[in-house]
Amino acid sequence: MSPSSHTIRKAVRHALGFRRGYEDPERSPGRRKSDHEPMRGWIPTLCIALGVALLDWTTKFLIAMNIPLDDLREVIPGKLAFWHVRNPAMVLGLWDNFPIATRKIIAVVAAVLGAIVLLQILGRGHRFPRQHRAWAWVFIGLVLGGMLGNLGERVVHWGVTDYISFRWGEYWLPPGNVADIALFLSMPLAIPVIVFEMIGRSRRGKVPLGNPVGATGD
């Protein structure tokens, strides 16, 4: 293995939470049980993300095939409608006045930064107690699925298909899609993930009496 590929592999494994005993057997094995467990959190995370993205792409395809662009059809009268629009801007209409090339660069940079952050959360979630890890997997899965849903469509024709609109008083709200809903649902899940990370940090270095180093569950 070349030095460059070894460095990349080591960086990826470190980001995923493999801290000790894998790349350097001479180092201390670590105090957490998770340091010795295989990293499998990516499996449920990827399943959730792909499920969200596939549902998002499927519904967008069905809307595009059955409802003309800019047409609004009420599903639940006065409450819910399918309003087929094409959004060429970024999230919340940001940077709509920028040239398309600039917006593409912003989208790529945002996607890379988002992937790095999610990778870090995945590794840290692996170090949560077992009963708390599912919160991290669901959070990452929803965020990644939302990103894949909208960014995947941008790869095809840049614009994003929005169609889910709710009635607010006399007006229909700007429409969204399944990817947007997934991202919205992920926001409250960030709170327990942050709390569990803070609890874990507060417990670092505290080994229960009678337990050898390496036997804690942090």
Image (tube, rainbow, N blue to C red):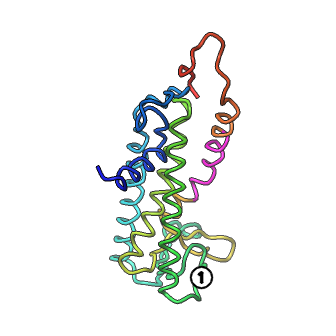
Asked if residue 117 is positioned above or below residue 200 in the image, the reply reads below
User: Where does the C terminus fall, quadrant-wise?
Assistant: top right
Q: Residue at x 44, y 32 (%)?
A: 21
Residue found at x 42% / y 75%: 154
188 left or right, relative to 39: right
Residue 108 left/right relative to 66:
right
Q: Can residue 186 be found in the magenta stretch?
A: yes
Q: Residue furthest top?
A: 210
Q: Quadrant of residue 145?
A: bottom left
Question: Residue 39 or 61: which is nearer the viewer?
Answer: 39
- Residue 162 position in % (x across, y down): 48, 74
Residue numbers of the magenta segment: 184-195
Tell me residue 107's x, y (percent).
Answer: 50, 74
User: Residue 213: x and y, percent?
Assistant: 57, 19
User: Does residue 193 lie above or below 177 as drawn?
Assistant: above
Q: Amino acid at mark 1?
A: Trp
Residue 133 x/y as whole percent: 52, 36
Q: Please name the predominant secondary structure of the magenta segment in the image.
A: helix
Report the number of discs.
Answer: 1
Can you say whether 51 is above or below 133 in the image?
Answer: below
Classed neighbour count for the residue bearing mark 1: other residues with Cα under 10 Å, few (<14), some (14–19), many (≥20): some
User: Element type at marker 1?
Assistant: loop
Label 1 sits on residue: 95
Towards the viewer: 96 or 78: 96
Does residue 90 show up magenta in the picture? no
Between 82 and 50, the residue placed more toward the observer is 50
**Picture layout, residue 127 above or below residue 214:** below
